[in-house]
Amino acid sequence: MVSAVIMAGGLGTRFWPKSRIDNPKQFLKFFEDITMIQATVRRVAKIFPAEKIYIVTNSEFAPRIYNEIPEIPKENVLIEPFRRDTAACVGLAAVKISLSDPEEVMVVLPSDHYIGDETEFAKTLEIAVELAKEKDCLTTLGIKPTRPETGYGYIKIGERLSLDVDKPIYRVKEFTEKPDLKLAREFYTRSDYFWNSGIFIWKINVILDHISSFLPHLYQGLMKIKNAMGTKKEEEVLKEEYSTFIPISIDYGIMEKASEVYMVLASFVWDDMGNWAALERIMKSDKDGNIVMGFHLGYDTKNCIISNNDKFIATLGIENLIIIETEDVILICNKNRAQEVKDLRELIKSKSLDKFL
């Protein structure tokens, strides 16, 4: 059997001020009248039955997930007591699923990605799942870069596997996390570097063995949590162990250290929706290159991203700006610095202006 695990506990800080502490990116609507997490569940539900779909989130977001995605059984919504990055998130889901089948294949997906061709996505996942069944390996989906990008991780590939499948599969040589612009430009010109989609496929026992080897403290805590699952002490043990976990991503903690790692080359349109600038790669612009969501009139306004709730925005003689209006915040940002919105948000936090976060 195969399960899908959707990670939905992040804050989406680079999409501030639309993405807020109580309304993060995965609950925003960008392209249609459903949220990003609803779109992710819809996409995955075409491949997996609802009882095989798990969502990992936190207590603040759980009620909203119950309400917006009622097709997922409540017991499949796993609640982390604290944010401890993706290694703990993956580990919690792995021990939960292992109770029923320790050799089940697990597909891990973020809740806030854009996938352009869902049929092609399903075909690619099917190949990756079969690879995970045959080999005790870790698998990721790789995306051919379309530009030098400093906000994504990169995969350097080695030899191609001789398998009779529709998609190329390569052994992974190394991972590089978010390079500077000079390095990103170099990677873009080379044929052996691909974007890391952040979509992972592996058997439950294989990922737990890797956690045991590379993150032993996390593994020990997960085993205690597993032993407490279904008992009266489950919530107590979960909080106690999670409080001791050091935040670390599955990429840093496991993928960069493991030896048996493979990449299936994906050909569907993909974007991790990392910041406001992502919208211009996906949404249709007007004749002046502007992406507009809301009531706006521009004169000599070019290549801007503009979003507002209920206020009329008029612009004159501007170019390459991001203008985002909410009920209590207005963001004005150079489009080339969209990645730094997270840093701006940290500055706001340092000034004790948390009510705007």
Image (spheres, rainbow, N blue to C red):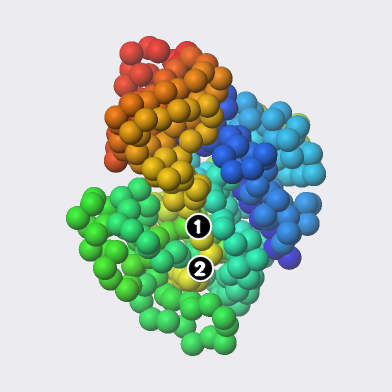
- Relative horizontal placement of residue 250, taking residue 156 as reference (left or right): right
* Residue at the spot 29% in from the left edge and 29% down from the top edge: 317
Residue at the location (57% across, 87% down)? 164
Image: 117 above or below 181: below
Residue indicated by mark 1: 270
Tell me the residue that label 2 is attached to.
266
State if disc 1 and disc 2 touch (CB < 8 Å): yes
The answer to whether residue 50 is visible is yes
Q: Secondary structure at mark 2?
A: strand
Q: Residue at x 34, y 67 (%)?
A: 193
Figure check: 275 above or below 206: above
Mark 2 burial class by Cα count in 10 Å: few <14, some 14-19, many 20+ = many
Please name the amino acid that badge 2 sits on. Answer: Ala
Residue 246 left/right relative to 183: right
Across and down, in percent, residue 322 comes to 37, 33
Q: Quadrant of residue 59?
A: top right
Q: Position of residue 188 (x, y in %)?
A: 29, 64
Judge by depth and name the residue closer to the eye, 214 or 37: 37
The quadrant of the picture occupied by the N terminus is bottom right
As drawn, the residue found furthest toward the left would be: 182
